[in-house]
Image (tube, rainbow, N blue to C red):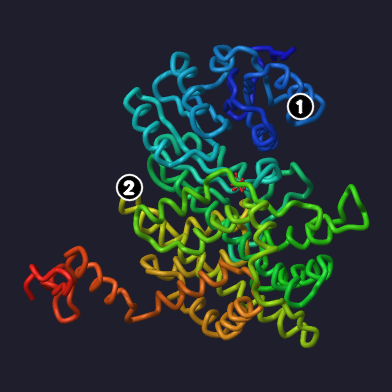
Amino acid sequence: MAKKKAATKKRGTNGATKNDVGLIGLAVMGQNLVLNMADHGFSVSVYNRTTAKMNEFIEKCEAEEPSANRVHGYAKLKAFVQSIAKPRKIIFLVKAGRPVDMVIDELLPLIDKGDILIDGGNSEWLDTIRREKDLAAKGINFVGSGVSGGELGARFGPSLMPGGSKEAWKSLGPIWRAIAAKVDKKTGAELQGAEPGKPVKGGETCTAHLGPDGAGHYVKMVHNGIEYIDMQLICEAYAILRGLLGMKPDEISKVFEDWNTGELSSYLIEITADVLQQKDPVNKRKFFVDSVLDAAGQKGTGKWTAMNALDIGIPANAIGEAVYARCLSALKEQRVAASKVLKGPKVKVIKSNRKKYIDMVCDALYCSKICAYAQGFQLMAEAQKEYNWKLNFGEIAKIWRGGCIIRARFLQKITDAYTKDKKLQNLMLDPYFKKAIHGSQDNWRKIVSMCAEHGISAPAFGSALAYYDGYRSEVLPANLLQGLRDYFGAHTYERVDKKRGQFFHVDWPDPKRPQYKV
Ligand code: 6PG
């Protein structure tokens, strides 16, 4: 049974008889966020639809300090709401979509004007805009906040990306700032507490108020789009090292370990090294990766990023390619059948100069990564116009330096780039990144062409390179495209010798339709 603490006892940081904050949804992320808040001195009311699960969690909390005195379970939603100090801050971590609306509907009759509801799931930003508007009309603050970092992030310091009103941020800020990951101000390296659960002292916190309504969830969605492409690039690098150089997973693991000491240093590179050296728990003679079916899953945030890029006309092709690569992988049975009938070049394993080729793959990975981030930031730059936000890109890169899945040394350079030039049009134009691409592009090009030559599918490497070459092209063949559109559909065209925005049309002759005059 959920045990209720004496109502007169002082709780958490507010020095009152009520708890500082409430949380609904005690799956692992929710539980860990609660423990993280308790570590930082906040008293937390918790509620879960399945009471047995909550009781189990409360028992676990009661077994240890500091959660023993700071986490309080309530079997009834009304009692849960009443146990929270006003203005109430109620976080929920439930599945995106309908479940979020259901939680809001259940809470509405129980809460008061000025209370703050915080959706910490991966909700679509348009839903968040809608919910914020509806609730604001009722006097309720609604915050859509990205929470990144998986289970461990939630427990010891996630990256938190909140949107919503400034008023809501005033109340939520102290909690979010306390529990978020902390990084060294200069290097961006993540800081650790003296031991797990011990709050980190000093450092910059990986959260900031990103803007009104859906801004937080939008930024989190782009974070996930970048997460998709980061992982796809890693997988392509692995495929090249394996296919072209004939390396075994544990050898490739060492390469990633080495890359993790340089410019590519990041959480995803670090865990790739771990996964690749792992042996299959069922058959210890095999590498784990060889026992995993090559059919990727996805929950939708990468797809939303790519779809929104198409909607607002921003070429985020590498991010889109990462989504398509997952879709292609999922067609496992078709690929198996096609592998038996569709011919390609036979991969010739390169036996000499391994180090040279590994360095080339490293360069290709780094350049592609710069392009992918350039696309993500450009997407946010366009979206802010659409939704009336004023996103601070330096700040966004800053709060991604620690806690989240895409945390990387590289993000410090992005922070620096946007701090120097707030209006930077494209990350590739920043002097640091421009120099990096200039220095490494020869190898990038060689790797892309070697993949084509040897029949290794590396869509993200290739697509990022096409983006780079397209972006730096003064003239693209879209002139011909416009001519064709004007020919068959009178869609008109702009001229190189006239100001933008003036449209022209040619009365095209059609030899097969003589009734049209020249
Ligand atoms: C994070 C992650 C997380 C996401 C998973 C699953 O920032 O902690 O982005 O929010 O839900 O990574 O994503 P897919 O199942 O779509 O790969």
Instruction: Give the label, 1 or 2, closer to the camera.
Output: 2
Give the SS element for disc 2: helix
Indicate the quadrant containing the C terminus: top left, top right, bottom left or bottom right: bottom left
- Relative to residue 379, is residue 57 depicted above or below? above
- Residue for badge 1: 61
Ligand 1: does it lie within 8 Å of the C-beta at label 1? no
- Relative to residue 92, is residue 405 depicted above or below? below
Q: Is residue 241 left or right of residue 328?
A: right
Classify 10 Å Cα crowding around label 2: few (below 14), some (14-19), many (20 and above): some
Q: Residue at x 35, y 24 (%)?
A: 139
Q: Is residue 490 left or right of residue 270?
A: left
- Relative to residue 210, is residue 243 depicted above or below? below
- Residue for badge 2: 387
Q: Earlier in the sequence, mark 1 or mark 2?
A: 1
- Relative to residue 484, is residue 155 depicted above or below? above
Residue 465, horizontal then vertical, whole percent: 51, 75
Residue 95, horizontal then vertical, whole percent: 56, 32
Give the SS element for disc 1: helix
Instruction: Tell me the number on the disc at residue 211.
Output: none
Mark 1–mark 2 Cα distance, whole angstroms, equals 42 Å
Q: Is residue 379 visible?
A: yes
- Amino acid identity at mark 1: Cys
- Amino acid identity at mark 2: Tyr
Indicate the quadrant containing the N terminus: top left, top right, bottom left or bottom right: top right
Return the residue nearer the eye: 141 or 232: 232
Return the residue nearer the eye: 368 or 176: 368
Residue 302, horizontal then vertical, whole percent: 52, 51
Q: Is residue 454 left or right of residue 514?
A: right
Q: Residue at x 38, y 61 (%)?
A: 314
* Residue 419, image quadrant: bottom left
Q: Is residue 166 visible?
A: no
Q: Residue at x 57, y 30 (%)?
A: 94
